[in-house]
Amino acid sequence: MCDVAKEAWRKYLIQLQVNPLWTKALTSGVVAALGEALAQKISGVKKIELRKVLLFSVFGFAYGGPFGHYLHKLMSIIFKGKNDTRTVAKMVLFEQLTSSPCNNLLFMLYYGLVIEGRTWALVKNKIKKDFTPVQLAAWKVGPMVAWVNNQFVPLELRVIFQCFVGLCWTIFLNLKARSAVIKDP
């Protein structure tokens, strides 16, 4: 089994070199779907809602992977590929003040409008109520994750690292969003 895993990892790394955007998009889509399926199970859903799993996969594939790919490319240009302590601190600040709020807002919009099929008015009220607590929670964890990612993870693996951390964050956001479904009239 170990040889199979090593060979799969080797082929995956080759794909990251040959088709980086496509590979990161696919990885993000698969991990997003896995996060949704796990969130459903954790929240007590008896039968997995495949539509939601598919919609999470679409979000990861169409947005998560590509956004992360281009964000890290842009940051490597802006910060000239450096990873000294001062530069990493600037990268963390940049990421936390720009992409973190944008990603959380976009996720909340997508979840409410597309996945749950709620009206704009309901989604807007949900965002007004929950965006600040969600973002504050993100800022409790995000800077540490961004620091590790930018300090220690090679550029080509940063999106994958974020995908797996994002799996946990997706479960958190998903469970937070589901709590509103129970409370909505």
Image (cartoon, helix red, strand yellow):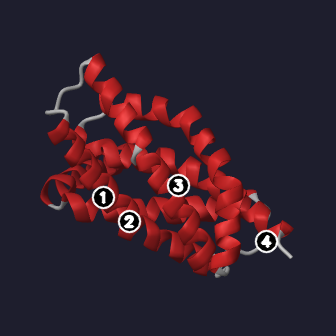
Judging depth in this view, the residue of 140 and 56 nearest the camera is 140
Number of the front mark, 3 or 4? 3
Residue shown at 24%/19% (left/top)?
A: 84
Q: What residue does disc 4 label?
A: 46
Which-is-in-front pick, marks 1 and 3? Answer: 3
Image quadrant occupied by the C terminus: bottom right
The structure residue drawn at horizontal position 53% and vertical position 62%, both measured from the top left corner, is 107
Residue type beneath disc 4: Lys
Single out the mark in the foreground, 1 or 4. 1
Q: Amino acid at mark 2?
A: Tyr
Q: CA distance from mark 1 to mark 4?
A: 31 Å
Instruction: Give the crowd class for mark 3: few <14, some 14-19, many >=20 residues within 10 Å.
Output: some
Q: Which residue in the protein does label 3 denote?
A: 104
Q: How many marks?
A: 4
Residue 63 tag number:
2
Q: Earlier in the sequence, mark 2 or mark 4?
A: 4
Q: Is residue 46 shown left or right of residue 84? A: right
Labels 2, 3: front one: 3
Q: Kindly check if marks 3 and 4 are in contact, taking CB atoms under 8 A apart as contact.
A: no
Tag on residue 109?
A: none
Residue named by callout 1: 24
Residues tagged 2 and 4 counted as in contact (Cβ below 8 A): no
